[in-house]
């Protein structure tokens, strides 16, 4: 095929999710510290957690990119300098930046750490890529408004040592390259400083000046009022086109997502990329599995975004702002006891007698029946109704030697049982 194997870059909003992303196939993860990241409401990483995450990733052959992609104000400059001194000691594999001032500080303090230019910087033409390359950036993230043809042209005009990174899966933003004033104007929390309240997902109506208190619905083709609510991006059916365009890194959106979401998306894209690089025929043969599996994570219906031309009215969701949920996260295997029980911190309710699924790293999952649930004190329970309760679960139908620490437990499609 002539193109190198692309990197799979997966989000992680916490140390637990970072480890999950790596276990389920990420080549690299991107994380935020407690400051200067555009996901301020994510759990994010303390200094010690970041150090542990970097160690874990490196021990498993993966890389860690740290986001510092806010648009800084004057009062941010000195704290950014201090933060980059900390990153210099931690030695992540890259720092993601949007602001030219922040870029300048990074080049002064830790020039040995590669810089990647965030999509927030509106990188929509090959001259912009060349501009950042001459300043020392090793990678630029494409603006989400670019088509595959435009990306392919950029690839042909910039040197081979300049990496191109593109979002291939996750939530789309109503604004240009993610730069939005709605949240700041309406809720006093700036999206450009990591505090977005997602007003594009809210329900709107029209109010007329002389009729206070009267609200008229904003209808589009009589389907509802969520006029800014975009479908989620999903390119799992278009891996060949992405590879052909010369994209070096396939980026998943979602640093606010659960371990189940990250495991599902990472595993699905990992298999799709590997299968296509092995053989386009193998990829085509497994396409239905990828499509079915990617549907098991939470999503807002799917679109291909701008990749094949400008989105039309079919790229929006007009009747609601809720997610489609086809599989529920139950917990992560934390320990397998000597008497064959699984220890986990419960995330959602399940009961004795339920058939559930254990997600493995490859394509094959293990369906099992829950035959017992005990509290930490050894008290039997018929269900696990309390979030974050530590429980011990007995399972039927599994060879316990096949279950590993870090495996994900989720509900399964009973039609498949």
Image (cartoon, rainbow, N blue to C red):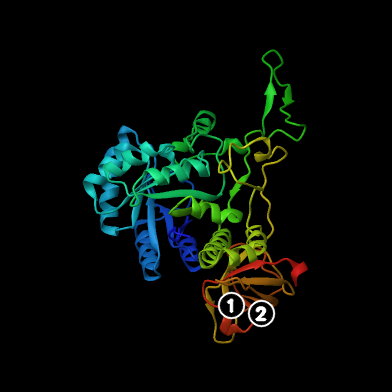
Residue at the outermost top position: 210
Point out the image quarter for the C terminus.
Answer: bottom right
- Number of residues whose C-alpha sits closer than 10 Å to that of mark 2, classed few (under 14), some (14–19) or many (20 or more): many
Q: Residue at x 22, y 48 (%)?
A: 109
Residue at the outermost bottom position: 339
**Viewer-side residue, 4 vs 326:** 4
Quadrant of the image occupied by residue 372: bottom right
**Viewer-side residue, 72 vs 271:** 271
Q: Is residue 346 visible?
A: no
Q: Is the residue 25 above or below the residue 192 in the image?
A: below
Quadrant of the image occupied by residue 99: top left
Measured from the top left, where is residue 102 in percent x and y? Answer: 31, 40
Q: Is residue 109 left or right of residue 216?
A: left
Q: Earlier in the sequence, mark 2 or mark 1?
A: 1
Q: Is residue 193 left or right of residue 84?
A: right
Q: Is the residue 147 above or below the residue 47 in the image?
A: above
Measured from the top left, where is residue 85 in percent x and y? Answer: 25, 51
**SS class of the residue under badge 1?**
strand
Q: CA distance from mark 2 to mark 1?
A: 8 Å
Which label number is shown at residue 395?
A: 2
**Viewer-side residue, 406 vs 416:** 416
Measured from the top left, where is residue 202 in percent x and y? Answer: 63, 36
Quadrant of the image occupied by residue 370: bottom right
Which label number is shown at residue 342?
A: 1
Q: Is the residue 279 above or below the residue 144 in the image?
A: below
Q: Residue at x 72, y 74 (%)?
A: 352
Q: Is residue 409 visible?
A: yes
**Badges 2 and 1: C-beta atoms under 8 Å apart?**
yes
**SS class of the residue under badge 2?**
strand
Q: Is residue 255 left or right of residue 138?
A: right
Q: Residue at x 70, y 41 (%)?
A: 320
- Number of residues whose C-alpha sits closer than 10 Å to that of mark 1, classed few (under 14), some (14–19) or many (20 or more): many
């Amino acid at each position: 095929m002539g193109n190198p194997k692309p990197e799979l870059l997966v989000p992680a909003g916490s140390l637990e999710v970072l480890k999950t992303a790596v276990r389920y196939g990420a080549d690299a993860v991107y994380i935020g510290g407690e400051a200067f990241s555009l996901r301020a409401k994510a759990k994010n990483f303390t200094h010690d957690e970041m150090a542990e995450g970097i160690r874990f990733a490196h021990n498993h052959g993966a890389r860690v990119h740290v986001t510092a992609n806010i648009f800084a104000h004057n009062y941010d400059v000195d704290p950014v300098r201090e933060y980059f001194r900390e990153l210099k000691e931690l030695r992540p594999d890259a720092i993601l930046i949007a602001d030219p001032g922040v870029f300048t500080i990074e080049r002064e303090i830790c020039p040995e750490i590669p810089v990647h230019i965030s999509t927030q910087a509106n990188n929509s033409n090959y001259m912009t890529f060349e501009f950042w390359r001459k300043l020392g950036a090793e990678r630029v993230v494409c603006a989400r408004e670019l088509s595959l043809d435009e990306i392919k042209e950029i690839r042909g005009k910039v040197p081979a040592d300049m990496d191109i990174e593109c979002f291939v899966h996750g939530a789309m933003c109503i604004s240009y390259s993610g730069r939005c004033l709605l949240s700041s104007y309406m809720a006093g929390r700036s999206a450009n400083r990591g505090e977005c309240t997602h007003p594009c997902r809210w329900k709107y109506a029209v109010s007329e000046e002389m009729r206070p208190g009267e609200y008229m619905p904003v209808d589009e083709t009589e389907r509802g009022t969520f006029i800014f609510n975009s479908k989620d991006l999903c390119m799992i059916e278009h891996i060949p086109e992405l590879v052909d365009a010369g994209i070096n890194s396939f980026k998943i959106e979602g640093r606010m997502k659960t371990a189940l979401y990250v495991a599902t998306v990472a595993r699905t894209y990992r298999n799709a990329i590997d299968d296509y690089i092995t053989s386009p025929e193998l990829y085509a043969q497994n396409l239905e599995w990828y499509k079915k599996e990617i549907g098991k994570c939470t999503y807002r219906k799917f679109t291909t975004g701008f990749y094949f031309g400008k989105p039309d009215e079919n790229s929006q969701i007009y009747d609601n702002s809720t997610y489609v949920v086809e599989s529920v996260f139950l917990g992560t295997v934390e320990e397998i006891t000597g008497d064959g029980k699984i220890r986990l911190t419960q995330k959602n309710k399940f009961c004795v007698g339920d058939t559930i699924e254990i997600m493995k790293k490859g394509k094959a999952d293990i369906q099992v029946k829950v035959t017992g649930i005990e509290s930490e004190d050894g008290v039997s329970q018929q269900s696990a109704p309390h979030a974050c309760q530590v429980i011990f679960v007995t399972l039927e139908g599994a060879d316990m030697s096949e279950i590993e620490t870090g495996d994900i437990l989720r509900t399964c499609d009973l039609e498949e049982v």
